[in-house]
Amino acid sequence: MKQAGTLILLFSLVFLSCKDSKNHTYRPSSIGAINSMVVVIDNELWKGSVGDSIRSHFAAPVVGMPMDEPLFSIDQLAPKFFTGSIRNTRSILYVGIDSLNLAHIKTNMYASPQRVGVIKGTTKAEVIQNIEAKADEIITAFKNMEIEAAQKRFNRSLNKETVLQEKFGISLKIPSIYKVGKQEDNFVWIDREIQKGTANVIVYDMPGDSFNNQSTLVKDIVAMRDSVGAKYIPGPDAIGKITHMRTEPAFAPYIYPVEIAGLKGVEVRGLWDIKNYPMAGPFLTYILNDKKNNRKLVLEGFVFAPATEKRDDLFELEAILKTLRLDAKVDKK
């Protein structure tokens, strides 16, 4: 009986070991440029109404950009060519007519990290219906994965300056290529050179009772940004004219609810320009309600790169700002 019990125990351990091995099958590292995706779909479907539906969602213009840039750069492949290393692409959308009518997201099917959106239907109409129903969820899954992948790359070489901890009691994972360029009592400006311009992070805070009136929220946010720009972000010299950063007055910013590091607040996207000078670009601002420190913490990224695409640079700034961590209570004197 003792021998039989031992054999049963051994078989159980082997079975569990095999099961655990299957659950942890090795996956190669995923590949693909930032904000890119592969759509696996028959050519005829891609050229018609199904393809139009896919493009209307996944190649929609990024909000708050000075020129149209798509959410994702898309490569389309017919299913017969979806083989080999292309399967390791980070973001994949598989669309087709089938005997099944479904839409779901799979994780790490061929590589890691990876998300595969699968959309099927028995007719074109069903496929389009499923795209319309599931596209936003798939886009969010792709974007969250892209953010995490970018943040993981930051860890290779991080900026070690401590000014954000000292002034605001926070930390951000910022690549070492970024450097502190300006700091005041309640303002820090960190930037790096990019093609034909700069990518910038600024941090400051506002009183805790700011922005409590929902009816004037947009107006109050614009006023805040413009006052900070006038005080800390001067423009180039223009004879007889005052120049500074402001919110582009011709376009109202877009505002969305957000939560970062446990702090609720708003995400603001729009265009900045320089008053009395021909310079402009996109910005992304997070205004977070830090009740513990009785303040509104403001994190902003903005890009200056005339006549070039800016989507990926602004996306990198988003990934940086979303690494926020509150390290300590702030002792403002």
Image: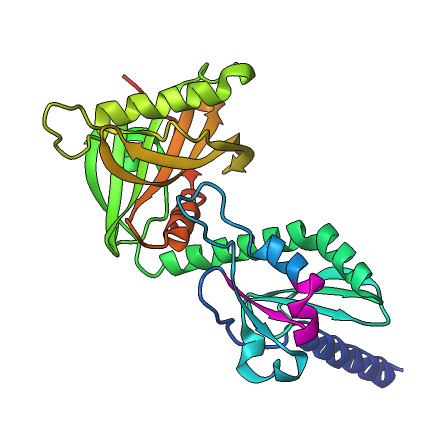
Give the quadrant of the C terminus: top left
Q: Is residue 228 magenta?
A: no
Name the residue: 42% across, 23% down: 221
Location of residue 196 by image quarter? bottom left
Q: Position of residue 59 (x, y in %)?
A: 55, 56
Determine whether, in the image, residue 237 is placed left or right of residue 18: left
Q: Position of residue 325 (x, y in %)?
A: 43, 40
Is residue 120 shown left or right of residue 169? right
Residue ID at (36%, 21%): 224
Q: Nearer the viewer, residue 164 or 214?
A: 214
Residue 37 drawn in magenta: yes
Percent across and percent down for residue 128 are 75, 58
Q: Is residue 37 left or right of residue 207?
A: right
State the colouring used for the structure image. rainbow
Which of the 4 image quadrants contains residue 281?
top left
Q: Nearer the viewer, residue 196 or 174?
A: 196
Q: Position of residue 223 (x, y in %)?
A: 37, 20
The answer to whether any part of residue 150 appears in the image is yes
Task: Say which residue appears at 39% left-offset and 44% top-offset.
Answer: 66
**Magenta segment range?**
36-51
Residue 42 visible here: no
Looking at the image, the residue that sits furthest to the front is 48
Instruction: Identify whether 265 is placed above or below 303.
Output: above
